[in-house]
Image: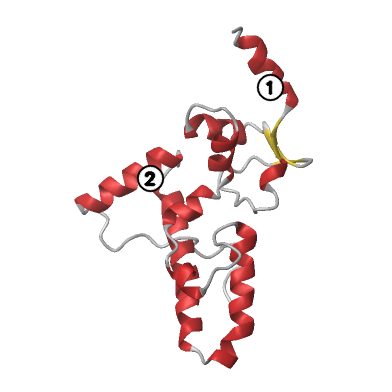
Amino acid sequence: MGDPKKSKKTFRRPRQIWTTDQLNSELYLIGSYGLRSKNELWKAQTKVADIRNQARELLALTIEGRQEKETKLLTYLQRLGLVQESATLDDVLNLKIEDILERRLQTVVMKKAIIKSPHQARQLVVHGHVSIGERIINIPGYPVKKEDESRISLNQDFINKLNTSNPE
């Protein structure tokens, strides 16, 4: 059963972490999405791998046995905004790590607001200037659901401070 104080690992690191191609691709992703460490990247990779493994297991089942589980998986991924409404399990198998990283609060704030860099978006989130509806969320890796995307807003105090510091 395990010790309740010690949660299980949320990521699996790559088997070979010192290959040049992998180092370059990881560095590019960390820079373009403003991740703090490779652990955040590995968490996203693990999430994609788990989703794809689940889809592979469903494809191995018979058609009658997989229908209910397949609709559950697809509706979950649609709510997160990872796949379209008309998606199939083949679309789930084509998921990439960028799809998960695009749904992080930090990235959504960067794309939605007029912010210069992902690092600035991360700082806004961590300092509590971003809210979804009435709830202030200060976790940059928070997965934003499709329905919550329109409710993201910067706090009014911060916007006023921004406007007074940039007299244009």
Task: Identify residue type, mark 2.
Answer: Leu
Q: Residue furthest front?
A: 86
Please identify the quarter of the rendering in which residue 14 is found: bottom left
Foreground: 128 or 93?
93
Q: Is residue 74 left or right of residue 91?
A: right
**Residue beneath the point at 64% across and 75% down:** 72
136 sits to left or right of 39: right
Marks 2 and 1 close (CB-CB < 8 Å): no
**Which residue reaches farthest top?**
167
- Picture layout, residue 152 above or below residue 41: above
Task: Identify residue for label 2.
Answer: 29
Neighbor class of circle 1 (other Cα within 10 Å; few <14, some 14-19, many 20+) is few
Please report the residue visible at 59 percent of the width from the left and 72 percent of the height from the top.
73
* Circle 1: element type: helix
**Which of the 4 image quadrants contains residue 111?**
top right
Residue 157 screen position, x and y as percent? 73, 22
Q: Residues within 10 Å of mark 2 (few under 14, many from 20)?
A: some
Residue at the disc numbered 1: 159
Q: Is residue 71 left or right of residue 134?
A: left
Colour pattern of the rendering: secondary structure
Q: Where the C terminus falls, by quadrant?
A: top right
Q: Nearer the viewer, residue 70 or 138?
A: 70
* Residue toward you, 31 or 40: 31
Identify the mark nearer the N-term, 2 or 1.
2
Q: Residue at x 53, y 41 (%)?
A: 107
On screen, residue 112 above or below 86: above
Q: Amino acid at mark 1?
A: Ile
- Cα distance in 3D space between marks 2 and 1: 29 Å
